[in-house]
Image (tube, grey):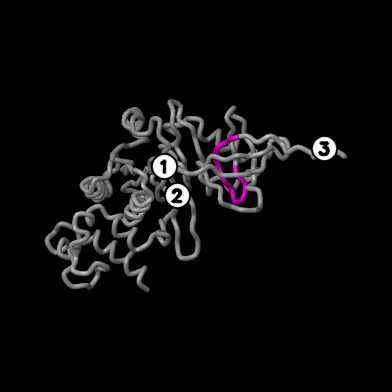
């Protein structure tokens, strides 16, 4: 009787890029692998730690995903998109030009807060005069709500930008998000000089050159830690959040929760609502409340 054929030895790796169902893995020795999830599942995201087995030269099958410490989503009514796993910081980048969407920023911060991930808001291109007042006002409002903020100009004062960014990113796994044109790629290239070369290497190995700008990618920082880059996009959907998630995701709401007349108060039209009383007394801004109302009403239709 012949002995059963042994399975290929498994190895541990982390996911450094994804393109559809194909992922790029980096093993513990720095080797790169093009991999697909066994069983035709597509639940692998950048940042995942996985167990894989070799299937051919430079190719592997992902057998299992290790438990995640965090997972950040964005979702609309039709699709949920997992952005990255095992990150401990979300860096939201915006600038005065091109025009920024404050609701995009607030949505990204809300998604991070409800996922239990720290967030940092960076105002880039501080050297631009046009739109500077509105950009600074947005930064200061968010800082007053308790989020960390930073104002820099990556392109015009790179040395200062590096000095301020390094202690905020060192030894952390940070996910970069932002609308297109806000200088996110310039920031990445400043902190990871080999980023463009690394992107080309991913593309060549996966034979997916035209898709590299639409995929999240992991880059190790020279001094420890990593940046996970995401493509610029114009909308940050929150369809995956429940009504309770939305309410508790507003830090200015938290001191007033539990003080409404009704336990199931939606904070929209109900009488004796503590949130709306705080709005009327100026403790909650009208703009932030309008943002909340749009999210809450979307969940009552």
| Left or right placement of residue 289 versus residue 17 in this view | left
- The vertical placement of 163 against 33, above or below, is above
User: Which residue appears farthest toward the top when viewing the image?
Assistant: 223
- The vertical placement of 110 against 225, above or below, is below
Q: Are marks 3 and 1 in contact (CB under 8 Å)?
A: no
- Secondary structure under tag 3 reads loop
- Secondary structure under tag 1 reads helix
Quarter occupied by residue 221: top left
- What segment is highlighted magenta in the picture? 12-23
Q: Is residue 185 magenta?
A: no
Quarter of the image that includes the C terminus: bottom left
Disc 1 crowd, CA 10 A, few/some/many (<14, 14-19, 20+): many
Q: Are marks 3 and 2 in contact (CB under 8 Å)?
A: no
Identify residue for label 3.
3
Q: Residue at x 59, y 51 (%)?
A: 20
Which marked residue is nearer to the observer: mark 3 or mark 1? 3
Quarter of the image that includes the N terminus: top right
The answer for how far apart the CA atoms under marks 3 and 2 are is 53 Å
Which of the two discs, 3 and 2, labels the residue nearer the N terminus? 3
């Amino acid at each position: 009787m012949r002995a059963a054929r042994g399975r290929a030895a498994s190895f541990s790796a982390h996911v450094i890029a994804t393109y559809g169902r194909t992922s790029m893995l980096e093993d513990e020795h720095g080797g790169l692998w093009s991999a697909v999830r066994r069983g035709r599942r597509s639940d692998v995201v950048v940042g995942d730690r996985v167990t894989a087995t070799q299937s051919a030269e430079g190719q592997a099958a992902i057998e299992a995903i290790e438990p995640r410490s965090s997972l950040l989503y964005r979702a609309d009514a039709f699709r949920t998109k997992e952005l990255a796993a095992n990150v401990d910081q979300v860096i939201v980048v915006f600038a005065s030009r091109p025009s920024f969407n404050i609701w995009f920023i607030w949505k990204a911060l809300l998604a991070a807060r409800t996922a239990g991930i720290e967030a940092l808001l960076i105002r880039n291109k501080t050297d631009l005069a046009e739109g500077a007042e509105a950009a600074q006002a947005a930064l200061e409002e968010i800082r007053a709500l308790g989020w960390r903020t930073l104002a820099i100009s990556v392109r015009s004062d790179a040395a200062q930008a590096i000095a301020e960014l390094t202690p905020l990113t060192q030894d952390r796994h940070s996910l970069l998000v932002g609308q297109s044109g806000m200088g996110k790629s310039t920031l990445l290239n400043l902190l990871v000089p080999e980023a463009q070369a690394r992107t080309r290497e991913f593309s060549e190995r996966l034979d997916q050159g035209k898709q590299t700008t639409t995929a999240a990618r992991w880059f190790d920082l020279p001094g420890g830690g990593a940046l996970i880059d995401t493509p610029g996009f114009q909308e940050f959907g929150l369809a995956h959040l429940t009504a309770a998630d939305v309410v508790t995701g507003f830090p200015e709401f938290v001191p007033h929760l539990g003080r409404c007349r009704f336990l199931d108060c939606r904070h929209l039209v109900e009488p004796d609502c503590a949130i709306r009383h705080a709005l009327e007394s100026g403790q909650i801004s009208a703009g932030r409340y309008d943002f909340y109302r749009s999210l809450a009403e979307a969940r009552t239709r």
